[in-house]
Image (tube, rainbow, N blue to C red):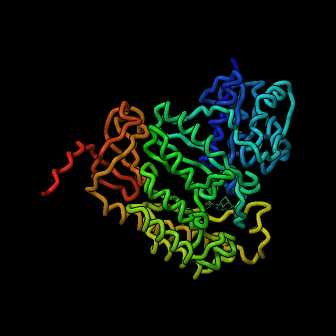
Amino acid sequence: MSTVYIETYGCQMNVSDSELMYGKLQAEGYAPVDSPVGADVVLVNTCAIRENAEQRVIGRLGELRRDLKPGAVLGVTGCMAQRLGPRLLETDTRVQLVVGPDAYRLLPQLIEGARNGERSTATDFDLEEHYEDFTARRFEGVKAWIPVQRGCDYRCTYCIVPTTRGPERSRRLAEVVRETQEVAAQGITEVVLLGQTVNSYHDGSADFADLLRAVGAVDGIRRVRYTSPHPNDFSDRVIAAMAETPAVCEHVHLPMQSGSTAMLKRMLRRYSREDYLACVERLRAAIPGLAITTDIIVGFPAESDEEFADTLSLCRAVRFDDAFTFKFSAREGTPATRMPPEWTIPAAVVDARYEALVATVRGIAREKNLGRLGERMEVLVEKEARKGGELLQARSRDFKTVLVSGTPDLVGRYLTVELTGTTGATFTGTPVQERQPLPMAV
Ligand code: SAH
Ligand code: SF4
Ligand code: F3S
């Protein structure tokens, strides 16, 4: 039997796509393996979001070239494949396949061709494609990634995703519910709904509010998460659905990007600092105990000291539970690359701002987390923290990582823990017996 190995870079959407590709190729008779050494087919599922994401892949392709057995097929899939297309075949002569995110249906036949020595590129967008007939081969047994939307119709000026993933389209609600029921039947209790601006989901008749309620109502599903929403797509309906659906977790990842209205305009984010804060306040008013995490970019063209100070002050105003921080990376073809060259921020300034931002974000998270020691909460055990150490990694509904001691048989189980320590970012916890409810005072 032929074997296939897929190596995945980038966001959860790529992880989910790799699960679909594995599923498809398994259905076609390929056996999945967990090493490229000796595999008949090796696919690298790539990310193009920042320059360094692509550099890593280029480096990795060089390494793989040495590991591959003679005659093995090497393919590049995902966002970098879509972005570079046939250019990848020219720069790396060992690569035989370049397949974009909407063309995975063609993989079996393209691989067959490659085994006969062909080299090919497939990068057409297909607005109907949701891979409904593929059965994902999931990497994780505890939670399931469920794509509900592909592509993106925003045009943030820094972002390559609209180029690599094409126009936005939503899966039909009934299909999402069907897949959720299937994973629930396998014993999975948590689902994560995926889309680039997931709360703009609309399948022609149902919106994201309908989707949250429908998925949250599936038997056996105890936790529903989603990523990433756009601040502009939080209608009252969506917020109400989040608040009123018990399975939907008290966490939202709400990319901010910048705290300066002028900067947000240059980024074409379509909201102001005040709009962002108002969105946070509406969410917090509706959902008690809501944790908020975010994405922030520093060093975008023409970022002034004042604009950067606005980013720091918005972080302090919101008090994020955590933030992913990025240095701006110019992506070929995006509107940001057409801004005046004198707007470019010197690397040393970017580095200094980045350090200041990380310190601010970490300081806030640490303060918030220290304030929660002694709290009791429900966690879902996700995996062993490290092999054989009897230490487990668990997660709270509000997305805190909690390390708990215990044996691997607890993976997939819900525990009540008391938070006993924090590094500032993650917690340690001790399992406690769930207390009987106190008798009602009369
Ligand atoms: N669709 C999601 C974001 C996907 S990309 C959303 O709109 O929220 C994940 C994050 O990468 C973005 O939120 C942004 O912070 C960062 N990012 C995207 N393009 C970037 C670039 N060119 N340089 C640096 N960071 C970037
Ligand atoms: Fe990129 Fe903006 Fe679309 Fe997010 S919303 S994927 S940042 S263009
Ligand atoms: Fe990267 Fe593509 Fe995701 S560019 S972040 S893998 S959508």
Where is residue 86 drawn, in percent x and y?
85, 44
Tell whether 66 sits left or right of 221: right
Q: Residue at x 52, y 68 (%)?
A: 355
Task: Look at the picture and state if 394 lies above or below 296.
Answer: above
Where is residue 378 drawn, in percent x and y?
34, 47
Instruction: Report the number of numbered marks.
Output: 0
Q: Give the residue at the far left of this rendering.
A: 442
Task: Look at the picture and state if 42 lies above or below 371.
Answer: above
Q: Which of 47 and 314 lies nearest the eye of the viewer?
A: 314
Q: Residue at x 74, y 40 (%)?
A: 76
Q: Give the residue at the far top of this rendering.
A: 1
Tell whether 256 sits left or right of 393: right
Tell whether 80 sits left or right of 405: right
Q: Which of 58 and 382 lies nearest the eye of the viewer?
A: 382
The answer to whether residue 74 is visible is yes
Q: Residue at x 52, y 59 (%)?
A: 253
Q: Which of 175 and 19 lies nearest the eye of the viewer?
A: 175
The answer to whether residue 55 is visible is no
Q: Give the residue at the far bottom of this rendering.
A: 306
Where is residue 298 drawn, in percent x and y?
60, 69
Where is residue 170 drawn, in percent x and y?
67, 50
Residue 201, quarter of the rendered image: bottom right
Q: Quadrant of the N terminus?
A: top right
> In which quadrant of this rendering is ligand 2 seen?
bottom right
Q: Which of 362 and 395 lies nearest the eye of the viewer?
A: 395
Q: Residue at x 43, y 38 (%)?
A: 383
Q: Quadrant of the C terminus?
A: bottom left
